[in-house]
Amino acid sequence: MRRAAAVVALLVAGVACGDDDEARPGELLEQDDVMIGAVEARRIRYGSVDVNGDPSEVGALLAVPDGPAPPSGWPVVAYAHPTTGGADACAPSADPALGEVGRAVTAWVGAGYVVVATDYEGIGAPGAHPYLHGGSAVRSIVDSVRAAREAVPAAGRRWAAVGWSQGGHAALFVAEQAAEQAPELELVGSVAIAPVVDLTEVAAADEVLGTTFLVLAINGFLATDPDVDVDDLLTDVGRDAIADAEERCQPRPVAGDIIEEESDALDAYFAASAVGQAPATVPILVQQGDADQLTTPDRTSDAVGRLCELGDTVALRSYAGADHTTVVQAGATDAAAWVADRFAGAAAPSTC
């Protein structure tokens, strides 16, 4: 996989940025053929809108099944990746080994779906990455589907979202917001694998790892509010950590306090990251490992309870002995069957 990733990086090194001042959301700006192992794919760049409402561009990986498309067009799976970091070097479209995105793309395209896997806003493209900002993630994902359909005329309008960890968080927000953002598309469901359910969860998981997530989140918050006085908000340690996160996919461990003083705006950013802000418009599958110490079973169960109270159709499936990483393979067969059923129009199960 690393060798394939290196080939991808070489093949896409010459991709030029489009003129994002003129790009409409979902407009295909660039595409280049790449290889993910033995799978032929494309690295695309497309127009979107950033967290402040300005035109932007985002990268993604795109793969198309072999053979003729079904009469209604290829069904589309939009894959949302786990945390890879916020620096430009952390874009899975340039290195599909990051977050095992290449593995996910090849699995879903092999199952007969056009697959598009966004990098997210600010990763491998101008601007900062608004980590765990639901609206930003939804825009990146929806616009990736639009761009995929422009790149692949045989792609249909029906699609599903699948995400792991940070991507699971994104998939839950897709279930809430995507239908309104893209009424020309038909979202059939969302799969959230070991989803982050709010920022406080990942920040509290582990002192070192949690601080890394917190730094990514603060950097994302700064992207949403350029008027924040960083000197007042952060300590010297915090400012150094932010600078490090902008350059590295695996920031160095941080020792010491990073926030200088409380910020109502930062607290509001954290609160807005919690899933269940509004009722979902499609069925949801949540997959959780019972040995996961990062996105813990109790927090996931509580979050699903909130979704049920909103009236959502949610199926929560637990996998014995699976942790935050192994749950992906433990639940792969179930996820594939659940997505196939949504495209087939079968009634969605619920554990609410």
Image: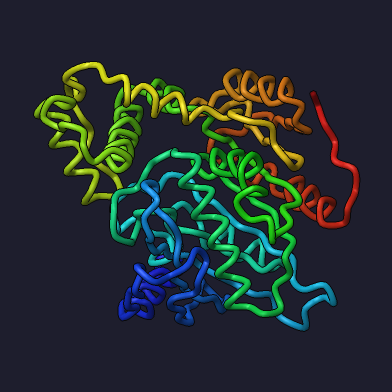
Q: Position of residue 226 (x, y in %)?
A: 23, 41
Q: At 35% from the left edge and 27% from the top edge, which residue is drawn?
A: 210
Place residue 279 in its image quadrant.
top right
Place residue 330 in its image quadrant.
top right
Colour setup of the view: rainbow
The one nearer the camera, 349 or 126, is 126
Q: Position of residue 183 (x, y in %)?
A: 68, 55
Place residue 216 in its image quadrant.
top left
Residue 112 appears in view:
no
Question: Is residue 40 positioned above or below 80 on the image?
Answer: below
Q: At 29% from the left edge and 45% from the top edge, which residue is drawn?
A: 250
Q: At 55% from the left edge and 24% from the top edge, which residue is drawn?
A: 296
Q: Position of residue 134 (x, y in %)?
A: 50, 40
The one nearer the camera, 64 or 185, is 185
Residue 239 appears in view:
yes
Q: Is residue 148 left or right of residue 223?
A: right
Q: Position of residue 133 (x, y in %)?
A: 44, 39
Question: Is residue 227 positioned above or below 88 on the image?
Answer: above
Q: How many marks?
A: 0
Q: Is residue 45 left or right of residue 215?
A: right
The one nearer the camera, 75 or 187, is 187
Q: Which quarter of the figure is the C terminus placed in?
A: top right
Question: Is residue 174 positioned above or below 313 on the image?
Answer: below
Question: Is residue 127 positioned above or below 298 on the image?
Answer: below
Q: Is residue 333 left or right of residue 230?
A: right
Q: Residue furthest right?
A: 346
